Image (tube, grey):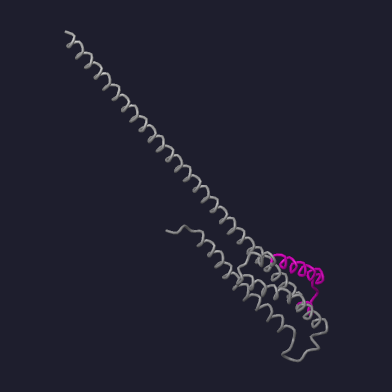
Amino acid sequence: MADSLLIAAVSVLGTLAGGGLTAVVTFRSERRKDAALAEQQRLQLRSVENQQVQLLQAEERRQLRELRIDHRRQMYQQFLADAHVVNHECDKLGDMIMRSYFEEVDDIDALAAEVDTAVRSAGSSLHKVQLEGPEAVSQLANEIMSNLSQLPPTLRILRRWRQNGNRGYEPGDEPTDAWYEVHSRLNDHLDTFVAAARSAINDLLSSSEPHP
């Protein structure tokens, strides 16, 4: 009887011990699973955060590129606009000077003053183009500005020639030749500048496009 009780007690203890060991193993396994899941979630969260940061940085770079492209375009357009104002005003002044020999014209001095003001405005725009670049565009802008600066003195010579009754120059050496030459060279440089400016803007656009 005592042996039976002892065997039964040992059997119960063995069952309890086995159950306890199983519970410990199960608990540890669950903790490892929970820890692995938490780590996976943490890594996923960090990956999402990194992706968001990269997207924000890419958007920032895109906006900066667009601002630079827009800024460059505005600088070029402003310089061209100012140059064309000078060109247009000089055309008017040249026509007025040529007509003044045959007929009464409007106030030449007032228009000449407007031309000088327009040239100064173009000079201010030139400095911005020089800062923006690139070198090829800046160089062409310098050449245009050189042409623009030659227009007022060329027109003053033309005006004096008209006032003197077209005298004081040898045949074939009249100031009209110099005026037409400067004017023609300016128009050629303006056309070349437009092409160079367009190319410079396209270069920025190409560099801002995503690469495969």
Question: Seen from this angle, which residue lies furthest front?
Answer: 2
Q: Residue at x 51, y 62 (%)?
A: 207
Tally of numbered tags = 0
| Front residue (pair 110, 183) | 183
Question: Seen from this angle, which residue lies furthest bottom?
Answer: 170
| Front residue (pair 208, 185) | 208
Question: Seen from this angle, which residue lies furthest top?
Answer: 1
State whether residue 46 is above or below residue 191: above
State whether residue 82 is above or below residue 11: below
State whether residue 3 is above or below residue 112: above
| Front residue (pair 2, 118) | 2
Q: Does the magenta stretch include residue 69?
A: no
Figure quadrant of the C terminus: bottom left
Within the image, what quadrant is residue 115 found in? bottom right
Q: Where residue 69 sits in the image (x, y, percent)?
A: 58, 59
Lateral position of residue 151 relative to residue 208, left or right: right
Lateral position of residue 183 relative to residue 105, left or right: left
Q: Residue at x 23, y 13 (%)?
A: 9
State whether residue 108 is above or below residue 72: below
| Front residue (pair 156, 78) | 78
Q: Residue at x 24, y 20 (%)?
A: 14
Within the image, what quadrant is residue 41 found in? top left
Figure quadrant of the N terminus: top left
Write down the region rendered in magenta: 99-125
Q: Where residue 196 sits in the image (x, y, percent)?
A: 57, 70
Lateral position of residue 77 relative to residue 28, left or right: right
* Secondary structure mainly formed by the magenta segment: helix
